[in-house]
Amino acid sequence: MSTDNKTRILEGSLNVYKAKGVKFTMDDLATELGMSKKTIYTVFPDKGTLLYEMVDYAFDSINATQSEALNNPDLSLVDKLKLILGVLPDAYAGVDFTQLYVLKGKYPKAYTRLQERLESGWEQTLNLIDEGIEKGLIRNVNKVVFQIAHEATLERFLMGDELSRNKITYEEALSELVEILTEGIIVK
């Protein structure tokens, strides 16, 4: 199976996830793609493997968007920091990430992978904070505490039901989190 088909299946999975959440079926995916389940199973042997790969696919897309922000000369250091902390590619607009708590019980490998990806890839962000401290734009903040606060809050967004109970979208919550965290470290 080609890489193009793998990407097509992953993108289709995200579309079906948007509509039905983690409880989507492989039949739903096959219908979305106009492809047989047998073809899907030649790429992903089961739904757990597909969800695991979806986590990586989503985070790789987020990392690519972060890199674009970091390399944009028109953005200030603070704007870059806000963007990389709150990046959500356009393809994920409207995705209800708060349903991911379902992974923990039913798809533990995908859930563990989600946690690993949430807790990794901080080098660029921490380097940007260091640069901001050096330039006097950001106060001397404990980066470990900053990172833990961001990670723990995202995990709570993803694994709890507080957002949905309060009719707050993931995008709204992420934007507010980034504002709270960055405004707390910017030198005024």
Image (cartoon, grey):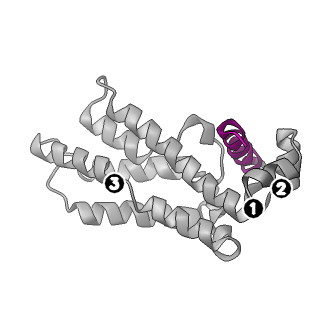
The label number, if any, that marks residue 95 in the structure image: none
Residue 149 percent location from the top left of the image: 36, 64
Q: Are marks 2 and 3 in contact (CB under 8 Å)?
A: no
Range of magenta residues: 1-18
Mark 2 nearby-residue class (10 Å; few <14, some 14–19, many ≥20):
some
Q: Amino acid at mark 1?
A: Lys
Q: Residue at x 20, y 62 (%)?
A: 142
Q: Are marks 2 and 1 in contact (CB under 8 Å)?
A: yes
Q: Locate residue 150 relative to residue 161 in the image: left or right.
A: left
49 up-or-down from 8: above or below: below
Q: Amino acid at mark 2?
A: Met
Instruction: Give the residue at mark 2.
Output: 26
Mark toward the viewer: 2 or 3 = 2
Q: Amino acid at mark 3?
A: Trp
Tell me the chief SS of the magenta region: helix
> Which quarter of the rendering shows the N terminus?
top right
Residue 44 percent location from the top left of the image: 73, 55
Residue 31 percent location from the top left of the image: 88, 44
Q: Secondary structure at mark 3?
A: loop
Quarter of image, res 47: bottom right
The label number, if any, that marks residue 122 in the structure image: 3
Residue in front for this viewpoint, 142 or 2? 2
139 up-or-down from 111: above or below: above
Q: Secondary structure at mark 1?
A: helix
Residue 83 percent location from the top left of the image: 39, 39
Q: Is residue 14 magenta?
A: yes
Q: Are marks 3 and 1 in contact (CB under 8 Å)?
A: no
Instruction: Give the residue at mark 1.
Output: 47
Q: Residue at x 24, y 60 (%)?
A: 143
